[in-house]
Image: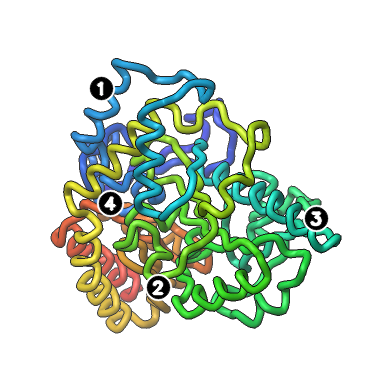
Amino acid sequence: MQRPIYNMPHYPTLTQNYAAPPFNAIKGDGVTLYDDSGNSYLDFTTGIAVTALGHCHPKWVQALKDQLDQLVHCSNLYGIPSQQKLADNLVKIAGKGKVLFCNSGAEANEALIKLARLHGQKKSEKTGKPCFDVLTAHNSFHGRTFGCMAATGQEKIQKGFHPMLKGFRHAQLNDLKSFEEQMDEHVAAVMIESIQGEGGIFPAETKFLVELKALCEQHNTLLLIDEVQCGIGRTGDFFAYQESGILPDAIGMAKGLGGGFPIGAIWIQEAHSTLFQPGSHGTTFGGNPLASAAGNAVIDILQEENLLKNVQTLSASWHEQLHQLKAQYPIIVKAIRGRGFMVGISVNDAITIVESARNKGLLIVPAGHDTVRLLPPLIASAQDLDQSVAILESVFKELSSH
């Protein structure tokens, strides 16, 4: 396959936030993405963990078409039955609590930060000491709004936008002592990703999550879990943190929840669900009828097609094959990390490997620490996973011969 080349002058009215695109995407079907030159690609980027059901799943498409014929938007001034149903679905999965809808992962995490501030105010009333700090992890990524940039523990994300919003500290993921050293009466919440995505696919270890939850309880500090990229079935559990057995105080989610339609949400444990009151937060489009229909369709299809089981069943052998590639090409592959259908391969030159894989028909995406991310849709078959390994082997073999 010869990759067509497009240069930025072809898109003169777009800002230069993104590099020139390698092709124009015009159609998607299941695990396959098509460009306008007639090429097809095995899509293990999935819109960066968004199209969890693959492209244009027929049941998902039909649910959106049905809703389009009824009502697209009416605002949260009125009751929205599909939104109420989606909240019920999420509470059944996460536990007793309340749900607030928004439009994206960054908005969900902004809402978590505001929840932390409200909790901190309550703590301050008791202690008489200011309490508004949020403790996050180095190498994290929580979004690109000002609050989320400050929460993000990566200088490259913050570069050019200083001074940052005050009130954020950073500790080392999977190092409880690092968090203990930062914890004091001024910390309102701890916010971490169950698996650091943009940072390079670094999972939070089960022992660390259990101990961190206990530390937060000891200090009456909220534990906020960012599941924006790693949630909605990607690891074989609906939420990635669930493997640890903990119950966070709040969860941020987005991406896969809409299956391709923009939606975000936070779930708040019942004990803290009254922190938000009328006027304390809002969103025009959050949870509107069309977005909620998309979210309900995703959850229904995950359950009807047993897609969590699909991830659990197929990921072990897929990971084993990837580790065999590491053993076969140790100079190129430094490490393999991740869980389920969220895998990071640490390499010397992520961009070269992404481009070479694309030229051979596999779409993957770079992440931090010179990592390439593999994010197959949850509908991926054993044959699809085998094909991804075969293409990567071809890439590594070609590079090793240079």
Residue 349 visible within the image: no
Label 2–label 4 contact, CB within 8 A = no
What residue is shown with label 2? 337
Residue 249 placed where, x, y %? 54, 58
Q: Residues within 10 Å of mark 3 (few under 14, many from 20)?
A: few
Q: CA distance from mark 4 to mark 1?
A: 24 Å
Residue type indicated by callout 3 = Glu
Residue 69 placed where, x, y %? 29, 16
Q: Give left or right: position of 27 versus 195.
A: left
Tell me the residue at 25%/79% (across/down): 324
> Which of disc 2 and disc 3 is earlier in sequence?
3
Q: CA distance from mark 3 to mark 2?
A: 43 Å
Residue 314 placed where, x, y %? 19, 66
Q: Secondary structure at mark 4?
A: loop
Q: CA distance from mark 2 to mark 1?
A: 40 Å
From the viewer's side, name the closer residue of 30 and 369: 30
Residue type indicated by callout 1 = Asp
Q: Give left or right: position of 182 versus 201.
A: right
> Which of disc 1 and disc 4 is earlier in sequence?
1
Q: CA distance from mark 4 to mark 3?
A: 47 Å
Residue type indicated by callout 4 = Pro
Q: Residues within 10 Å of mark 4 (few under 14, many from 20)?
A: many
Q: Give left or right: position of 249 versus 158.
A: left
What residue is shown with label 3? 125
Number of dots carrying numbers: 4
> Which of disc 4 and disc 2 is earlier in sequence?
2
Q: CA distance from mark 2 to mark 4?
A: 18 Å
What residue is shown with label 4? 377
Label 2–label 1 contact, CB within 8 A = no
